[in-house]
Amino acid sequence: MSGSWVNSPPVMALLVVIPSQVIWSYVAFGVVFAIGLLTIFLRADWQKARGFDKLILFGPPFYAAPLAAFGTEHFTLTAVVVSLIPKWIPWHLFWAYFVGACFIAASLSLVTRIQARLAASLLALTFFLFVVLMDAPAWAQDPRDRFALALVLRELSFSGGALALAANLTQPWHERSTHVLATIARYFFAVAVLFYSFEQFRHGNYVPGIPLERMTPAYVYGHAVWAYLVALVYLIAGALLLIGKKTRAAATGIGLTVLFVELIVYVPIAIVERASLDNGFNYLADTLMFCGAVVLLAGAMPREA
């Protein structure tokens, strides 16, 4: 009797040993997210914001908390990070540690708003370089690999989110440069979400939001429904972003949708796979960062009557 109780699923779930590298990622994520929330409420931004502008306030912590966790992984999973750097680039170990430290510093800058424009500008450049130096060449080796293209557009979206924040923080007298940066960010997202929409209509059994190499687990309520829902929102909102109509509402709608599937799909995955970075935490963090990036884009879009 006692043996069957010990071997029951709830008890076995509690006995799962979480590796230290996973714990460090959660700690970095939690600390930066908490700082971001404190900043929002201590500065009284929540009371000043109206309607969906309250969601836009969460853009920096949604973007920065996963960034801090990914920066931490440069120190806890250094060998894996080093293996991703192209061979022709020298000093692999140096770049792994340097970029990890920069990610952590930038995440703190975004949520505390200390030199946030500089941090956002450098992040936009960094993710764009990731696309040019690593992701795009990897996709070019096999253009039929839809997952490789999804990664290219994901990194481009991360670049666009940081670019949008930099544009939003630019002084009013630089209106032309602000408009240019925000427009580039808008096109980055428009292309990404339209492609994601197409892929999710075709492959509804894969995880929604960012269509990566994982099937939606059977224990997720609704299963493929969420992929088709996201695909529909992406199709409508992506078209609006592409033609430049109702852009703030379109970006906000995408952000709300991705946040919804984050709670419905990725939080359960992270709980079940809590001892894994690759199968659990990274999926949750990746999607939340995409949500944060598109919310940052909404904040940079013009207000409409």
Image (cartoon, grey):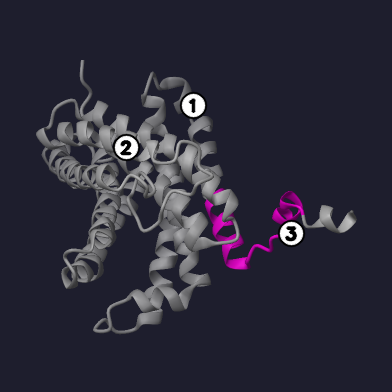
Do the residues under discs 1 and 2 have CB atoms within 8 angstroms?
no
Identified at 71% across, 52% down, the residue is 9
Circle 2 packing at 10 Å, graded few (<14), some (14-19), many (20+), is: many
Q: Say which residue label 1 marks.
A: 44
Asked which secondary structure carries label 1, the reply is: loop
- Judge whether 105 appears above or below 92 on screen: above
Residue 259 x %, y %: 42, 36
- Visible residue check, residue 124: yes
Please identify the quarter of the rendering in which residue 23 is found. Answer: bottom right
Name the amino acid type tagged 2: Tyr
- Judge whether 166 appears above or below 24 on screen: above
Q: Main secondary structure of the magenta part?
A: helix
Please identify the quarter of the rendering in which residue 3 is found. Answer: bottom right
> Which comes sooner in the sequence, label 1 or label 2?
1
The one of 79 and 107 positioned closer to us in this rendering: 79
The quarter of the rendered structure image containing the N terminus is bottom right
- Judge whether 42 appears above or below 188 on screen: above
Q: Say which residue label 3 marks.
A: 15
Name the amino acid type tagged 3: Leu
Asked which secondary structure carries label 2, the reply is: helix
The quarter of the rendered structure image containing the C terminus is top left
The number of callouts visible is: 3
Asked which secondary structure carries label 3, the reply is: loop
Identified at 34% across, 74% down, the residue is 84
The part of the chain drawn in magenta is: 8-30
Residue 74 x %, y %: 46, 69
